[in-house]
Image: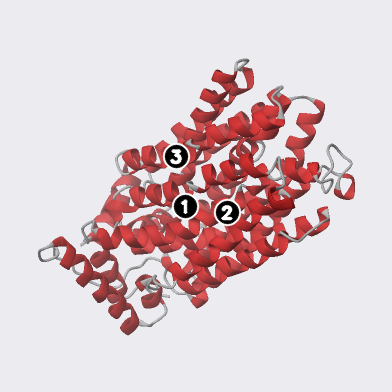
């Protein structure tokens, strides 16, 4: 699929939009879906104590299929995320961003409500599997949608705000778990109330998403230029009215882009994008181990260090406040520091502060290091989501994102059982050795092989991959840089 001059003009028209209430409104609408995505995803962190209390889950290797039930719950969630990201998310490139976004949210809602009525570990895990499919597809679609709707000078901050709103789910979930899971309000097990809260709220989110426009970039890429123009004109008029004066002129699109080539050539495995695909496979595989190795197991890690269940849930509730706060830190840094280096720095922070958490002997230090690990994890996740959505072209963005993300879900399944075994046979310190090693690989993959993305158009970022492959092998480094610079100037002219 070629990028027509009209498709390029859409990019230029969106990238020159000033920041107004309408732009932030689109970000917040997407963030509502992200709120329930986070609420669902991290239920596997808080539900196990209540499920064990009800006799549905069992500790150690006495659970489902002779495995740890908490490990099985995490594995079922990651398996659902894998299926949703690998298979369902690619539908966003076919049927549209908005259609898949709302459908995935409804799938999650149905599975969550069904989970409230389960009385066996197998039933719980099956519902988590189905809910994970919806969450996985929604997560990828949010990344593609947000990347295509906001101007380039706002992408980092937009993802940070989206994550900040989404991660408000963490203290809500932690507070509900702290208040309900140890008890049975109205004679109903507390964990069921926690699940019900997320399932019913998603219906409201679905209604809000009907107010989202379809991505004009996606419409133009599928030959629906009249619809794309209608969406874009409506957006421009709203922004101009709020801006109070005429919009800045858009850069003219002088010709078709070479980015992507034909539809067949626009593949994550083509010579142009294969390197980026492999780099993100490695990145996601080890990011998942490091990120969820801490966040998924936080209350259990606290118990392993000697805290009572009720106290561990209280500590986790306090630490959870870092989730909605830390994306604002990401927002301050995201468009000022090159995204790839911010990811590297925060991965280093996870490794260092995780070591401090493992060695802390006092409650105050446990909370401080827990907050710092969560801060770094969340800033890294916010920037990593934006970064990965930026480096593929529009016509393969969702399927490529879905594929590379899904690899992380496979390692998430494995890490659920690896962490359970380490905790049972070695201790919490071994878990943080695993997390630190994973973060080292994350740093190397992005730091050495990731492209720059800050303040660059999506076509320019994608075009770099094409230009790099068009430079013959064996070209001296200085000549290679000169040819790449010339290619970039040519695309801008």
Q: CA distance from mark 2 to mark 1?
A: 9 Å
Residue 332, percent from left and from top: 32, 39
Q: Residue at x 39, y 77 (%)?
A: 219
Q: Is residue 97 above or below residue 412?
A: below
Residue at the top extreme of this rendering: 361
Q: Residues within 10 Å of mark 2 (few under 14, many from 20)?
A: many
First of labels 3, 2 by sequence position = 3
Residue 175, percent from left and from top: 57, 41
Query: SS at mark 2?
Result: helix
Q: Residue 388, labelled with which disc?
A: 1
Residue 467, percent from left and from top: 37, 57
Q: Residue at x 22, y 61 (%)?
A: 17
Q: Which residue is labeled 2 in the image?
A: 405
Q: Which residue is labeled 3 in the image?
A: 379
Q: CA distance from mark 3 to mark 2?
A: 18 Å
Residue 483, percent from left and from top: 31, 51
Mark 3 or mark 2: which is in front?
3
Please state if 302 lies on the left or on the right of 404 as rendered.
right
The image quarter in which residue 305 lies? top right
Check contact, mark 3 vs mark 2: CB within 8 A.
Answer: no
Please state if 470 lies on the left or on the right of 297 as rendered.
left
First of labels 2, 1 by sequence position = 1
Task: For residue 398, say whether it is visible.
Answer: yes
Task: For residue 253, say whether it is visible.
Answer: no
Q: Nearer the viewer, residue 416 or 10?
A: 416
Query: SS at mark 3?
Result: helix
Q: Residues within 10 Å of mark 3 (few under 14, many from 20)?
A: many
């Amino acid at each position: 699929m070629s990028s027509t001059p009209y498709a390029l003009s859409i990019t230029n028209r969106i990238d020159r939009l000033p920041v107004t209430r309408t732009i932030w409104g689109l970000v917040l609408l997407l963030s509502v879906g992200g709120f329930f995505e986070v609420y669902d995803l991290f239920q596997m962190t808080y539900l196990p104590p209540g499920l064990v209390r009800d006799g549905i889950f069992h500790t150690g290797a006495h659970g489902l299929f002779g495995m740890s039930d908490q490990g099985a719950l995490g594995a079922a969630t990651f398996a659902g995320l894998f299926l949703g990201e690998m298979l369902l998310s690619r539908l966003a490139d076919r049927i549209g961003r908005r259609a898949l976004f709302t459908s995935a949210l409804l799938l999650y809602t149905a599975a969550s409500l069904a989970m409230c009525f389960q009385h066996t570990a197998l039933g719980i895990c099956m519902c988590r599997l189905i809910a994970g499919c919806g969450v996985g597809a929604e997560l990828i679609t949010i990344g593609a949608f947000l990347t295509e709707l906001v101007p380039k000078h706002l992408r980092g901050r937009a993802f940070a705000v989206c994550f900040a709103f989404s991660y408000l789910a963490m203290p809500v979930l932690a507070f509900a778990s702290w208040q309900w899971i140890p008890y049975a309000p109205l004679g109903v097990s507390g964990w069921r109330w926690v699940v019900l809260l997320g399932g019913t709220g998603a219906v409201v989110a679905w209604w809000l998403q009907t107010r989202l426009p379809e991505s004009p970039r996606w419409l133009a890429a599928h030959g629906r230029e009249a619809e794309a123009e209608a969406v874009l004109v409506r957006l421009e008029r709203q922004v101009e009215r709020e801006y109070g004066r005429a919009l800045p002129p858009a850069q003219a699109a002088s010709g078709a882009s070479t980015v992507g080539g034909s539809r067949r050539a626009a593949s994550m495995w083509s010579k142009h994008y294969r390197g980026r695909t492999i780099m993100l496979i490695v990145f996601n595989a080890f990011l998942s181990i490091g990120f969820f190795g801490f966040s998924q197991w936080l209350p259990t890690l606290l118990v392993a260090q000697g805290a009572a269940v009720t106290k561990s849930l209280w500590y986790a509730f306090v630490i959870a406040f870092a989730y909605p706060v830390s994306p604002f830190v990401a927002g301050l840094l995201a468009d000022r520091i090159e995204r790839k280096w911010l990811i590297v720095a925060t991965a280093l922070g996870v490794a260092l502060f995780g070591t401090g958490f493992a060695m802390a002997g006092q409650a105050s230090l446990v909370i401080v290091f827990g907050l710092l690990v969560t801060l770094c994890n969340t800033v890294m996740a916010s920037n990593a989501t934006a970064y990965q959505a930026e480096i593929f072209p529009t016509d393969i963005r969702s399927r490529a994102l879905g594929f590379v993300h899904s690899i992380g879900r496979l390692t998430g399944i494995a890490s659920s059982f690896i962490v359970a075994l380490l905790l049972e046979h070695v201790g919490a310190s071994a878990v943080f050795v695993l997390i630190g090693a994973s973060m080292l690989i994350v740093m190397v993959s992005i730091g050495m092989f990731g492209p720059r993305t800050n303040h660059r158009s999506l076509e320019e970022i994608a075009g770099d991959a094409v230009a790099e492959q068009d430079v013959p092998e064996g070209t001296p480094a200085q000549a290679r840089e000169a040819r790449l610079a010339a290619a970039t100037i040519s695309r801008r002219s």
